[in-house]
């Protein structure tokens, strides 16, 4: 029986040289193409730099620029040492969030825009999660609430607020849809940027909301769960809108 060598080393044997003009872009495009087609998978190690340069027909400077670009995008992990090299990652949501944060500032996206997106996305998340949530997901959500309450009791208000925000990411995982997880993680990271700049919420109101939400979620009551999520997100929006207005007035 004939076997096919699908290792990263064998796959790269099919490479043809890329055009030298803006060669690093051609390298990044080719790697992304190979990932999308399943020729390269998370954990695969790329061939050494010298070998890649020869196969691609590019200089070491262009190759390194391409690798750094892919690392910044969360596609590659560059490790140092004897067992180091360039490895395909499973994806880094923080890279997407960083790019979105830049766009938020450059394109003057407002806090209202962010809140609207969060509410819309979280409505879909709630509806999907109610039909797919597993006991382990419920336990993770309950653990998140308990940890946030402990932080609140210890007076660690910013840590408590960030733990409250993380609740939405855990809920997104209950949808079993990685796209929603990525969307919620990105929106959450954007929101944390505002929170760290403006300060933390200082009451137990979110905990009360979480308990009502969990009761509805556990009972499979979609309408009640959606209403509680909407109300909580709108209250948070109003709070941080006031804090933002106060911060502008103090400047």
Image: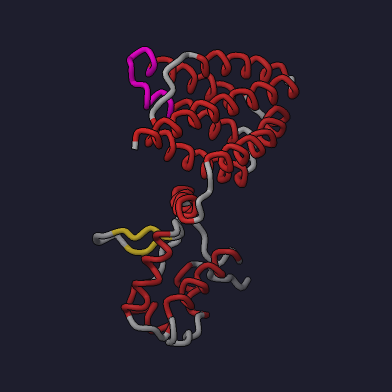
Relative to residue 228, is residue 158 drawn left or right?
A: left
Quadrant in the picture for the N terminus: bottom right
Please provide the residue range marked out in magenta.
Answer: 151-162
Q: Residue at x 50, y 26 (%)?
A: 239
Question: Which one is nearer the viewer's eye here, 189 or 38?
Answer: 189
Q: x%, y% of residue 242? A: 48, 28
Magenta segment, prevailing SS (helix, strand or loop): helix
Check the image and name the residue furthest to the left: 81
Rendered view: 147 above or below 78: above
Q: x%, y% of residue 37? A: 61, 66
Q: Is residue 208 magenta?
A: no
Rendered view: 27 above or below 212: below
Q: x%, y% of residue 63? A: 37, 75
Relative to residue 173, is residue 192 drawn left or right?
A: left
Mark yes or no: residue 127 visible.
yes
Question: Which one is nearer the viewer's eye here, 17 or 44?
Answer: 17
Q: x%, y% of residue 25? A: 46, 75
Q: How many marks?
A: 0
Q: Residue at x 33, y 21 (%)?
A: 156
Check the image and name the residue furthest to the front: 249
Mark yes or no: residue 90 visible.
no
Q: Residue at x 40, y 59 (%)?
A: 72
- Could you say which quadrant of the image residue 222 lies in? top right
Quadrant in the picture for the C terminus: top left
Question: Which one is nearer the viewer's eye here, 110 or 27?
Answer: 110
Tell me which colouring the rendered structure shows: secondary structure
Rendered view: 187 above or below 14: above
């Amino acid at each position: 029986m004939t076997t096919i060598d699908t290792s990263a080393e064998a796959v790269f044997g099919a490479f043809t040289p890329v055009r030298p003009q803006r060669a690093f872009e051609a390298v990044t495009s080719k790697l992304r193409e190979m990932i999308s087609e399943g020729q390269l998978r998370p954990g695969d190690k790329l061939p050494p730099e010298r070998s890649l340069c020869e196969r691609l027909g590019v200089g070491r400077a262009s190759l390194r620029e391409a690798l750094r670009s892919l690392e910044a995008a969360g596609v590659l992990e560059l490790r140092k040492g004897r067992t180091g090299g360039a490895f395909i990652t499973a994806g880094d949501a923080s890279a997407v969030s960083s790019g979105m944060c830049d766009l938020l500032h450059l394109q003057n996206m407002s806090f209202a825009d962010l809140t609207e997106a969060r509410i819309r996305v979280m409505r879909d998340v709630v509806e999907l999660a109610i039909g797919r949530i597993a006991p382990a997901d419920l336990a993770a959500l309950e653990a998140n609430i308990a940890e946030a309450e402990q932080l609140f009791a210890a007076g660690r208000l910013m840590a408590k607020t960030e733990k409250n925000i993380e609740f939405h990411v855990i809920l997104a995982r209950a949808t079993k849809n990685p796209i929603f997880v990525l969307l919620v993680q990105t929106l959450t990271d954007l929101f944390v940027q505002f929170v760290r700049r403006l300060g933390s919420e200082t009451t137990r109101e979110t905990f009360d909301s979480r308990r009502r939400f969990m009761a509805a979620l556990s009972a499979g009551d979609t309408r009640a769960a959606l209403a509680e999520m909407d109300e909580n997100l709108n209250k948070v929006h109003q709070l941080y809108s006031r804090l933002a207005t106060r911060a502008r007035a103090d400047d």
